Amino acid sequence: MSRPSAFIRIPKERIGVLVGSEGKVKREIEEKLMVELQIESDSGGVTITLSEKATDPSLLLRAKDLVTAIGRGFSPEHAFRLLENPDNIFDFIDLRTIFGRSESDIRRVKGRIIGAEGKTRRTIEELTDTSVVVYGHTVGFIGTFEQVDAARNAVQMLIDGCQHHTVYKYLQRKRVELKKQQLELWEKPEDEKMRDL
């Protein structure tokens, strides 16, 4: 019986990062997610095959997200956030779907997202607790669904031409909302315990 597999292509210049020093990153992905990676250095093709020992088919999808995140510019340390918390997801915006092949528009909007000396990107990361990478023609995000949604909306506002201070205000508001939700999650079990008494 053939084992489940997936194929993705990442930029050739990211292959070295995926493999890591002496194959360390590749090995870590294979061990933690019970997959085998076959990497075509010349084309950037990566075939991910589920190991025979793996009992959870979702590991294949998680491995695919992890490899794609590294391919989209995340360092292995940031990409491994996907394994630290099962609620963490990877998502990205492809600027070519918005601006077509207009390199000047993509460059301009990347500058707005990154900001002077990386300030805007850092602010988005800090206020949403996400990892954000602007690489090539994509903007990538890693965090929980709610965190990524807030960061993605902020980036979309910048793409749409909103002023930076408007985006920061939105992010401050979202941060308060997210913190409130986290507090409610922590408090709920206590409330339920009180009701049971």
Image (cartoon, rainbow, N blue to C red):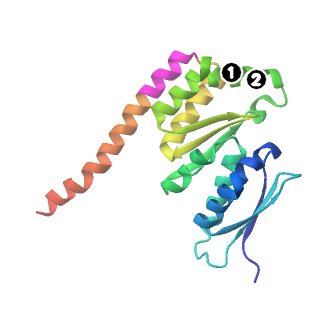
Q: How many marks?
A: 2
Residue that label 1 marks: 111
Q: Main secondary structure of the magenta part?
A: helix
Picture quarter containing residue 116?
Answer: top right
> At numbered mark 1, what does the secondary structure look like: helix, strand or loop?
helix
Q: Nearer the viewer, residue 80 or 167?
A: 80
The mark found on residue 22 in the picture is none
What residue appears at the point 71 percent right and 43 percent down from the top-left corner?
72
> At numbered mark 2, what does the secondary structure look like: helix, strand or loop?
helix
Residue type at tag 1 = Gly
In this rendering, the answer to whether 133 lies above or below 117 is below
Picture quarter containing residue 183?
Answer: top left
Q: Is residue 43 left or right of residue 172?
A: right
In this rendering, the answer to whether 12 lies above or below 99 is below
Q: x%, y% of residue 16? A: 76, 48
Residue type at tag 2 = Arg
167 drawn magenta:
yes
Q: Are marks 1 and 2 in contact (CB under 8 Å)?
A: yes
- Bounds of the magenta span? 163-172
- For the residues marked 1 and 2, what is the alpha-carbon distance in whole angstroms? 6 Å
In this rendering, the answer to whether 62 lies above or below 178 is below
Q: Residue furthest left?
A: 197
Image quarter of the N terminus: bottom right
The mark found on residue 107 in the picture is 2
What residue appears at the point 49 percent right and 47 percent down from the top-left corner?
144
Q: Nearer the viewer, residue 125 or 193?
A: 125
